[in-house]
Image (cartoon, rainbow, N blue to C red):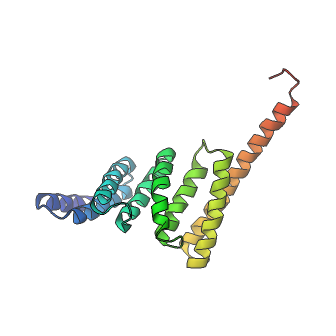
């Protein structure tokens, strides 16, 4: 499948195919690389594809937003949390204009919420926001898709994980606070 996708892209480039078609084929090629576990190559391609859609159609076009979601997902997979947060903070306000019940907007928010709680450097406030966002997304998914839908089920699992991360960090903070309070004056 990879060689077929590469040949298809090569042919489009040689025959001056439309930019739209080139970006679609590049997206298919990125999926093939992802299936092979070549995540760095996927990320490189996703950046290029996102930039291409942005130049071709602008930030509000569905294809641009979909590719922003794909890029954010790749950044999450590679634990590039700050980059993912930065991208999503720029693109989520645009996606929200599509509507909060829109599947793409929901998925982008879901990636953002996962980025918040999976980051080892997440603050207690980040984790609190992740839990809150997951609760909101789970309610929306349940209302829009129903309780048995895979997105709803995935959100339920992530909500449990986000809550666990929050409670673990909250316990850590509480233990440190208690330790500091137990120190004799001048013992720090």
Q: Residue at x 36, y 66 (%)?
A: 61
Decide if residue 173 is on the left or right side of residue 6: right
Spot occupied by residue 8 in the image (x, y as percentages of width and height): 19, 62
Decide if residue 32 is on the left or right side of residue 142: left
**Furthest-left residue in view?**
15
Residue 65 picture quarter: bottom left
Q: Residue at x 70, y 54 (%)?
A: 164
Relative depth, front residue between 119 and 37: 119
Indicate whether 94 appears above or below 150. above
Spot occupied by residue 48 in the image (x, y as percentages of width and height): 31, 52
Q: Residue at x 58, y 51 (%)?
A: 116
Residue 135 picture quarter: bottom right
Decide if residue 20 is on the left or right side of residue 110: left
Relative depth, front residue between 61 and 79: 61
Residue 51 picture quarter: bottom left
Decide if residue 152 is on the left or right side of residue 74: right
Spot occupied by residue 1 in the image (x, y as percentages of width and height): 27, 63
Residue 118 in view: yes
Indicate whether 156 appears above or below 30. below
Residue 1 in view: no
Q: Residue at x 41, y 55 (%)?
A: 71
Spot occupied by residue 55 in the image (x, y as percentages of width and height): 29, 57
């Amino acid at each position: 499948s990879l060689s077929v996708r590469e040949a298809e892209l090569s042919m489009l480039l040689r025959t001056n195919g439309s930019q739209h078609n080139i970006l679609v084929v590049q997206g298919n090629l990125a999926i093939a690389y992802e299936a092979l576990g070549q995540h760095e190559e996927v990320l490189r391609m996703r950046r290029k594809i996102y930039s291409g859609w942005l130049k071709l159609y602008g930030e509000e076009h569905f294809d641009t937003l979909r590719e922003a979601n794909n890029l954010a997902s790749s950044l999450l997979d590679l634990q590039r949390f700050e980059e993912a947060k930065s991208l999503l903070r720029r693109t989520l306000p645009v996606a929200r204009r599509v509507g909060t019940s829109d599947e793409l907007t929901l998925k982008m928010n879901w990636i953002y919420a996962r980025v918040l709680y999976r980051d080892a450097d997440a603050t207690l406030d980040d984790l609190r926001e992740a839990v809150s966002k997951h609760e909101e997304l789970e309610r929306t998914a349940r209302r829009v898709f129903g309780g048995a839908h895979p997105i709803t089920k995935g959100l339920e699992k992530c909500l449990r994980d986000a809550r666990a991360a929050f409670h673990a960090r909250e316990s850590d903070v509480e233990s440190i606070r208690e330790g500091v309070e137990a120190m004799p004056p001048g013992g720090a």
